[in-house]
Image (spheres, coloured by chain):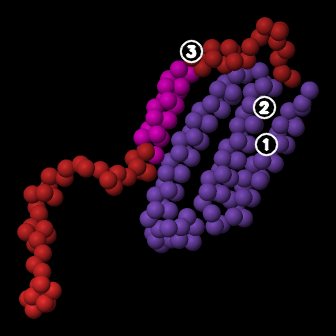
Amino acid sequence: MIALSDYLILSSIVFCIGLAGIFINRTNIIMILMCVELILAAVNTNFIAFSFYGSDLSGQIFVFFILTVAAAEVAIGLAILTLMYRNRGSIDIDVTNTLKG
Amino acid sequence: MPEKHGSSYSNITAIAEQLYTIYVYPFELAAILLLIAIIAAITLVHRNQINSKKQIISEQINVQAKDRMRFATINKDKVKESK
């Protein structure tokens, strides 16, 4: 029997990897997209673990919707990246400073 | 501690029962969201086919003679020599 704390430890590790990836890697946008996915996966793990141990199925159903939003986000993010590569010839973050924000 | 279920219990059936009854409207909304994502991604990435033979009427009407015709200067002496 896997304890609840094991799931929480795993999900916090995955979350930290995603967060560290975003902060350490400041050059590649695809890496940042992947790290956001990692963070979402950690949240999903938490949801499923609590849903299983709390005997409430709503958590697992909410994971479906999180996955849907993640899929939509990645689809549009990759499309924007493709456009950016076509227009700029590079997908580095250093190049994306034309707005001077 | 998690609930103990019998061997006939199916997690998929239990989730589906909730998903298709209580959460029907969020489910449909998720479907619409995915559709919007598909359309957005395709409209962003899709570009016109280069070898398309589509007729662009405004270009045809606005064409000027100088766009289609070119005056070439021919050296008469050279033409005679070659004959």
State the SS at label 3: loop
Task: Report, in whole angstroms, how far the alpha carbon at label 3 lies from the one at label 1.
Answer: 30 Å
Colour representing chain A: purple
State the SS at label 2: helix
Residue range highlighted in magenta: B22-41
Q: Which chain is red?
A: B
| Magenta span contains residue B58 | no
State the SS at label 1: helix
Residue that numbered label 2 is attached to: A49
- Up-down relation of residue A96 to residue B25 (above or below): below
Who's the residue at 74% across and 27% down the image?
A51
- Up-down relation of residue B41 to residue A81 (above or below): above
**Outermost residue, front side:** B83
Q: Residues at marks 1 and 2, common chain?
A: yes
Badge 1: chain ID:
A
Residue that numbered label 3 is attached to: B21
Task: Report, in whole angstroms, how far the alpha carbon at label 1 lies from the one at label 2.
Answer: 10 Å
- Badge 2: few (under 14), some or many (20 or more) residues near its Cα, within 10 Å? many
- Asked if marks 1 and 2 touch (Cβ < 8 Å), the reply is yes
